Amino acid sequence: MKIAVTSTGDELISDMDPRFGRAKYFIMVNPETLEYEIVENKQNLNLPQGAGIQAAKTIVDQKADVLISGNCGPKAFQVLNAAGTKVVTGAKGRVIDAITQYKSGQLQAVEGPNVEGHWV
């Protein structure tokens, strides 16, 4: 299993980024071993629109099974859902905390987006 977490930094102890499309990094974590890799999201940071869709494509291309973020808009959610990637929103704290909370069942996948499009 691979979990993608939106992050402000490039370590497991970094704070989560509540934004999805404009998060600085995606940290791809194996929740069993805690091995991880960093995917920069710099191509989407300054897009006037479509950042969520492009970020969702990045997550799908990375073959993440789950995305954990603070928020996810409707277009990004649609791309992720179509690819079979579970979406978890409302997470806060550090990346490692989000992974731990997901593994223990404290965070659950959602059935739809939790914000309107163009949330910055």
Image (tube, helix red, strand yellow):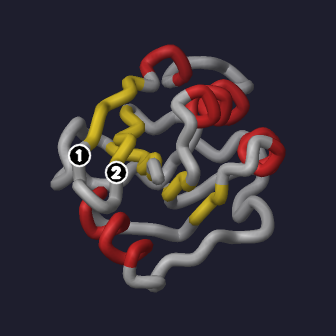
Residue sitting at x 47%, y 53%: 1
Lateral position of residue 98 relative to residue 56, left or right? left
Residue sitting at x 58%, y 65%: 89
Q: CA distance from mark 1 to mark 2?
A: 5 Å
Q: Secondary structure at mark 1?
A: loop
Q: Are marks 1 and 2 in contact (CB under 8 Å)?
A: yes
Which of the two residues, 69 or 64, is positioned nearer the viewer here?
64
Q: Which residue is mark 1?
A: 35
Q: Residues within 10 Å of mark 1 (few under 14, many from 20)?
A: few
Residue sitting at x 63%, y 34%: 60
Label of residue 30 in the image: 2
- Going by the numbered disc 2, the residue's amino acid type is Asn
Residue sitting at x 53%, y 70%: 90
Lateral position of residue 96 relative to residue 27, left or right? left
Q: Is residue 2 above or below residue 89?
A: above
Q: Is residue 31 above or below residue 23?
A: below
Q: Is residue 40 above or below residue 26?
A: above
Quadrant for the C terminus, please: top right
Expressed as whole percent of the image width and height from the top left, the position of residue 70 reads 51, 60
Q: Secondary structure at mark 2?
A: loop
